[in-house]
Image: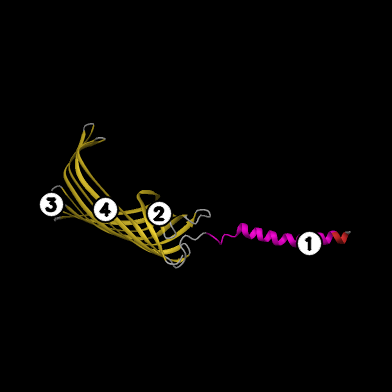
Protein backbone atom coordinates (compact mmCIF):
# COMPACT_ATOMS: atom_id res chain seq x y z
CA UNK A 1 0.00 0.00 0.00
CA UNK A 2 2.80 2.38 0.93
CA UNK A 3 4.67 1.66 -2.31
CA UNK A 4 1.48 2.31 -4.28
CA UNK A 5 1.01 5.76 -2.66
CA UNK A 6 4.63 6.74 -3.31
CA UNK A 7 4.37 5.63 -6.94
CA UNK A 8 1.17 7.64 -7.39
CA UNK A 9 2.75 10.78 -5.92
CA UNK A 10 5.79 10.38 -8.18
CA UNK A 11 3.58 10.08 -11.25
CA UNK A 12 1.60 13.20 -10.25
CA UNK A 13 4.75 15.21 -9.68
CA UNK A 14 6.23 14.02 -12.95
CA UNK A 15 3.14 15.15 -14.83
CA UNK A 16 2.62 18.38 -12.87
CA UNK A 17 6.09 19.93 -12.95
CA UNK A 18 6.30 20.22 -16.79
CA UNK A 19 2.76 21.65 -16.85
CA UNK A 20 3.69 24.29 -14.25
CA UNK A 21 6.84 25.13 -16.19
CA UNK A 22 4.87 25.60 -19.39
CA UNK A 23 2.29 27.77 -17.59
CA UNK A 24 5.02 29.95 -16.05
CA UNK A 25 6.74 30.37 -19.40
CA UNK A 26 3.50 31.36 -21.13
CA UNK A 27 2.58 33.74 -18.33
CA UNK A 28 5.88 35.63 -18.03
CA UNK A 29 7.42 35.33 -21.50
CA UNK A 30 7.12 38.79 -23.10
CA UNK A 31 9.46 38.13 -26.03
CA UNK A 32 6.52 37.86 -28.43
CA UNK A 33 5.69 41.59 -28.28
CA UNK A 34 3.72 42.67 -31.39
CA UNK A 35 5.86 44.18 -34.15
CA UNK A 36 4.57 47.41 -35.67
CA UNK A 37 7.49 47.98 -38.07
CA UNK A 38 9.82 44.98 -38.61
CA UNK A 39 13.57 45.18 -38.88
CA UNK A 40 14.85 46.11 -42.34
CA UNK A 41 11.78 48.21 -43.29
CA UNK A 42 11.66 51.87 -44.26
CA UNK A 43 9.08 54.35 -43.04
CA UNK A 44 8.36 57.44 -45.16
CA UNK A 45 5.73 60.08 -44.56
CA UNK A 46 5.24 63.35 -42.75
CA UNK A 47 2.66 66.08 -42.36
CA UNK A 48 1.54 69.29 -44.08
CA UNK A 49 -0.71 72.16 -43.02
CA UNK A 50 -2.23 75.31 -44.47
CA UNK A 51 -4.35 78.02 -42.90
CA UNK A 52 -5.49 81.44 -44.05
CA UNK A 53 -7.75 84.27 -42.91
CA UNK A 54 -9.30 87.54 -44.02
CA UNK A 55 -10.92 89.98 -41.59
CA UNK A 56 -13.08 92.92 -42.71
CA UNK A 57 -13.98 95.32 -39.89
CA UNK A 58 -14.13 92.30 -37.53
CA UNK A 59 -14.49 92.59 -33.74
CA UNK A 60 -12.99 89.97 -31.46
CA UNK A 61 -13.29 90.35 -27.67
CA UNK A 62 -11.66 93.70 -26.81
CA UNK A 63 -10.07 94.09 -30.26
CA UNK A 64 -12.22 96.20 -32.58
CA UNK A 65 -12.19 97.01 -36.27
CA UNK A 66 -9.76 94.33 -37.42
CA UNK A 67 -8.82 94.53 -41.11
CA UNK A 68 -6.19 91.94 -41.98
CA UNK A 69 -5.23 89.12 -44.29
CA UNK A 70 -2.71 86.34 -43.75
CA UNK A 71 -1.70 82.74 -44.27
CA UNK A 72 0.54 80.01 -42.86
CA UNK A 73 1.83 77.00 -44.81
CA UNK A 74 4.10 74.24 -43.50
CA UNK A 75 5.35 70.81 -44.56
CA UNK A 76 7.63 68.28 -42.87
CA UNK A 77 8.51 65.04 -44.75
CA UNK A 78 10.38 62.32 -42.86
CA UNK A 79 12.18 59.02 -43.53
CA UNK A 80 13.21 56.36 -41.02
CA UNK A 81 15.07 53.04 -41.32
CA UNK A 82 14.36 50.29 -38.75
CA UNK A 83 17.52 48.45 -37.76
CA UNK A 84 15.61 46.51 -35.09
CA UNK A 85 11.96 45.54 -34.69
CA UNK A 86 10.06 48.70 -33.65
CA UNK A 87 13.30 50.74 -33.39
CA UNK A 88 14.62 52.97 -36.17
CA UNK A 89 16.75 56.01 -37.00
CA UNK A 90 15.42 58.77 -39.20
CA UNK A 91 15.56 62.32 -40.55
CA UNK A 92 12.80 64.95 -40.73
CA UNK A 93 13.08 68.18 -42.75
CA UNK A 94 10.49 70.93 -42.39
CA UNK A 95 9.66 74.22 -44.09
CA UNK A 96 7.22 76.92 -43.01
CA UNK A 97 6.13 80.30 -44.40
CA UNK A 98 3.89 82.86 -42.70
CA UNK A 99 2.46 86.23 -43.77
CA UNK A 100 0.34 88.79 -41.92
CA UNK A 101 -0.88 92.10 -43.37
CA UNK A 102 -2.81 94.05 -40.71
CA UNK A 103 -4.19 97.32 -42.03
CA UNK A 104 -5.96 98.36 -38.83
CA UNK A 105 -7.18 97.21 -35.44
CA UNK A 106 -7.43 98.60 -31.93
CA UNK A 107 -7.92 97.36 -28.39
CA UNK A 108 -9.17 99.45 -25.47
CA UNK A 109 -8.92 98.37 -21.83
CA UNK A 110 -10.07 101.14 -19.55
CA UNK A 111 -7.98 104.22 -20.25
CA UNK A 112 -5.37 102.21 -22.18
CA UNK A 113 -5.80 102.00 -25.96
CA UNK A 114 -3.53 100.11 -28.34
CA UNK A 115 -3.75 100.29 -32.11
CA UNK A 116 -2.14 98.73 -35.19
CA UNK A 117 -1.94 100.39 -38.61
CA UNK A 118 -0.25 99.06 -41.75
CA UNK A 119 1.71 96.34 -39.99
CA UNK A 120 3.25 93.78 -42.34
CA UNK A 121 5.36 90.70 -41.59
CA UNK A 122 6.65 87.88 -43.77
CA UNK A 123 8.74 85.02 -42.38
CA UNK A 124 10.05 81.62 -43.42
CA UNK A 125 12.07 78.91 -41.71
CA UNK A 126 13.76 75.60 -42.44
CA UNK A 127 14.42 72.97 -39.79
CA UNK A 128 15.91 69.47 -39.67
CA UNK A 129 15.79 66.78 -36.99
CA UNK A 130 17.81 63.55 -36.73
CA UNK A 131 15.94 61.19 -34.44
CA UNK A 132 15.47 57.70 -33.03
CA UNK A 133 11.93 56.31 -33.04
CA UNK A 134 10.61 53.49 -30.87
CA UNK A 135 7.16 51.91 -31.12
CA UNK A 136 5.50 50.54 -27.99
CA UNK A 137 2.35 48.51 -28.88
CA UNK A 138 -0.73 49.05 -26.72
CA UNK A 139 -1.25 45.74 -24.86
CA UNK A 140 -1.22 42.99 -27.50
CA UNK A 141 -2.49 45.21 -30.30
CA UNK A 142 -0.79 44.91 -33.69
CA UNK A 143 -2.41 48.11 -34.98
CA UNK A 144 -2.32 50.73 -32.22
CA UNK A 145 0.90 51.77 -30.50
CA UNK A 146 2.58 54.61 -28.73
CA UNK A 147 5.81 55.95 -30.20
CA UNK A 148 8.48 58.37 -29.11
CA UNK A 149 10.99 60.40 -31.16
CA UNK A 150 14.17 61.56 -29.46
CA UNK A 151 16.72 63.57 -31.39
CA UNK A 152 18.70 66.67 -32.27
CA UNK A 153 17.02 69.55 -34.13
CA UNK A 154 18.41 72.62 -35.86
CA UNK A 155 16.50 75.50 -37.47
CA UNK A 156 17.18 78.64 -39.50
CA UNK A 157 14.70 81.37 -40.34
CA UNK A 158 14.29 84.83 -41.86
CA UNK A 159 11.66 87.49 -41.23
CA UNK A 160 10.75 91.02 -42.30
CA UNK A 161 8.56 93.35 -40.26
CA UNK A 162 7.56 96.85 -41.32
CA UNK A 163 4.93 99.58 -40.99
CA UNK A 164 4.86 100.28 -44.71
CA UNK A 165 4.29 98.23 -47.85
CA UNK A 166 6.88 100.08 -49.91
CA UNK A 167 10.49 101.05 -49.38
CA UNK A 168 13.25 98.52 -48.92
CA UNK A 169 14.93 100.73 -46.27
CA UNK A 170 12.00 100.76 -43.83
CA UNK A 171 11.43 98.01 -41.29
CA UNK A 172 13.29 95.28 -39.44
CA UNK A 173 15.05 92.31 -41.03
CA UNK A 174 15.72 89.31 -38.86
CA UNK A 175 17.70 86.07 -39.00
CA UNK A 176 17.12 83.43 -36.34
CA UNK A 177 18.90 80.21 -35.41
CA UNK A 178 17.92 77.44 -33.00
CA UNK A 179 19.37 74.10 -31.89
CA UNK A 180 17.97 71.69 -29.35
CA UNK A 181 17.46 68.19 -28.01
CA UNK A 182 13.79 67.18 -28.24
CA UNK A 183 11.51 64.42 -26.98
CA UNK A 184 8.26 64.00 -28.95
CA UNK A 185 5.81 61.26 -27.89
CA UNK A 186 2.82 60.27 -30.00
CA UNK A 187 0.35 57.58 -30.96
CA UNK A 188 0.04 55.67 -34.26
CA UNK A 189 -2.67 53.48 -35.77
CA UNK A 190 -2.17 51.12 -38.70
CA UNK A 191 -4.97 51.67 -41.21
CA UNK A 192 -3.54 48.98 -43.48
CA UNK A 193 -0.41 46.82 -43.28
CA UNK A 194 1.44 49.55 -45.19
CA UNK A 195 -0.10 52.81 -43.93
CA UNK A 196 -0.36 54.40 -40.50
CA UNK A 197 -1.83 57.67 -39.24
CA UNK A 198 -0.20 59.41 -36.31
CA UNK A 199 -0.41 62.31 -33.89
CA UNK A 200 2.51 63.64 -31.87
CA UNK A 201 3.50 66.68 -29.82
CA UNK A 202 6.53 68.11 -28.06
CA UNK A 203 6.88 67.20 -24.40
CA UNK A 204 10.46 67.87 -23.28
CA UNK A 205 13.56 69.52 -24.60
CA UNK A 206 16.65 71.67 -24.18
CA UNK A 207 17.16 74.44 -26.73
CA UNK A 208 19.20 77.55 -27.52
CA UNK A 209 18.16 80.27 -29.95
CA UNK A 210 19.61 83.49 -31.31
CA UNK A 211 18.03 86.31 -33.33
CA UNK A 212 19.95 88.97 -35.24
CA UNK A 213 18.09 92.06 -36.46
CA UNK A 214 18.80 95.09 -38.61
CA UNK A 215 16.44 98.06 -38.19
CA UNK A 216 15.95 100.33 -41.20
CA UNK A 217 19.18 98.93 -42.70
CA UNK A 218 21.18 100.83 -40.05
CA UNK A 219 20.74 99.80 -36.40
CA UNK A 220 21.61 96.24 -35.32
CA UNK A 221 19.89 94.26 -32.57
CA UNK A 222 20.08 90.76 -31.17
CA UNK A 223 18.41 88.38 -28.75
CA UNK A 224 19.50 85.12 -27.14
CA UNK A 225 17.17 82.60 -25.52
CA UNK A 226 17.61 79.39 -23.53
CA UNK A 227 14.92 76.89 -22.59
CA UNK A 228 14.61 73.70 -20.58
CA UNK A 229 11.07 72.40 -20.64
CA UNK A 230 9.05 69.42 -19.55
CA UNK A 231 5.44 69.99 -20.51
CA UNK A 232 2.84 69.20 -23.15
CA UNK A 233 3.48 71.77 -25.89
CA UNK A 234 0.20 71.78 -27.81
CA UNK A 235 1.56 74.36 -30.28
CA UNK A 236 3.76 71.55 -31.67
CA UNK A 237 0.85 69.14 -32.23
CA UNK A 238 1.33 67.24 -35.51
CA UNK A 239 -0.98 64.95 -37.51
CA UNK A 240 0.27 62.96 -40.48
CA UNK A 241 0.55 59.76 -42.49
CA UNK A 242 3.43 57.26 -42.65
CA UNK A 243 3.99 54.54 -45.28
CA UNK A 244 5.91 51.34 -44.48
CA UNK A 245 8.16 50.09 -47.28
CA UNK A 246 9.90 46.71 -47.39
CA UNK A 247 9.05 43.13 -46.49
CA UNK A 248 6.39 42.67 -43.86
Q: Which residue is drawn at 36% across and 54% down?
A: 240
State if disc 3 and disc 4 touch (CB < 8 Å): no
Q: Earlier in the sequence, mark 1 or mark 4?
A: 1
Crowding near the residue tagged with mark 4, few <14, some 14–19, many ≥20 C-alpha atoms within 10 Å: some
Residue, disc 4: 73
Crowding near the residue tagged with mark 2, few <14, some 14–19, many ≥20 C-alpha atoms within 10 Å: many
As drawn, the residue found furthest toward the right would be 1
Query: Disc 2 versus disc 4: distance between alpha carbons?
Result: 20 Å
Residue, disc 2: 198
> Which SS class for mark 3?
loop
Left or right: 35, with 198 as reference point: right
The magenta region covers 5-33
Query: Disc 3 versus disc 2: distance between alpha carbons?
Result: 44 Å
Left or right: 5, with 92 as reference point: right
Query: Disc 1 versus disc 4: distance between alpha carbons?
Result: 75 Å
Q: Earlier in the sequence, mark 3 or mark 1?
A: 1
Q: Does the magenta-highlighted stretch encompass residue 27?
A: yes
Q: Which of marks 2 and 4 is nearer the N terminus?
A: 4
> At which x and y percent is residue 66?
20, 39
Residue 11, numbered circle:
1
Q: Is residue 170 visible?
A: yes
State if disc 4 and disc 1 touch (CB < 8 Å): no
Residue 195 lies in quadrant: bottom left
Residue 59 sits above or below residue 141 on the image = above
Left or right: 175, with 81 as reference point: left
> Which SS class for mark 4?
strand
Please name which of the two marks, 4 or 3, marks the residue nearer to the observer. Answer: 4
Closest to the observer, 98 or 116: 98
Q: Residue at x 40, y 54 (%)?
A: 198
Residue, disc 3: 170
Amino acid sequence: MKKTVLLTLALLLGAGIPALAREKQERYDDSARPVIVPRGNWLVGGNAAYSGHRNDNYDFAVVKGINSVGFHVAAAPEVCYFFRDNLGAGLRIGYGRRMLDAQSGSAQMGSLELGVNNYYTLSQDVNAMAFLRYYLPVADSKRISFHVDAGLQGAFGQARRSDEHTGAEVGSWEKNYRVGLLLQPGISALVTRRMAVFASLGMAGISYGRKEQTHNQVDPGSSNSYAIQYLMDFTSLRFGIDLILGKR
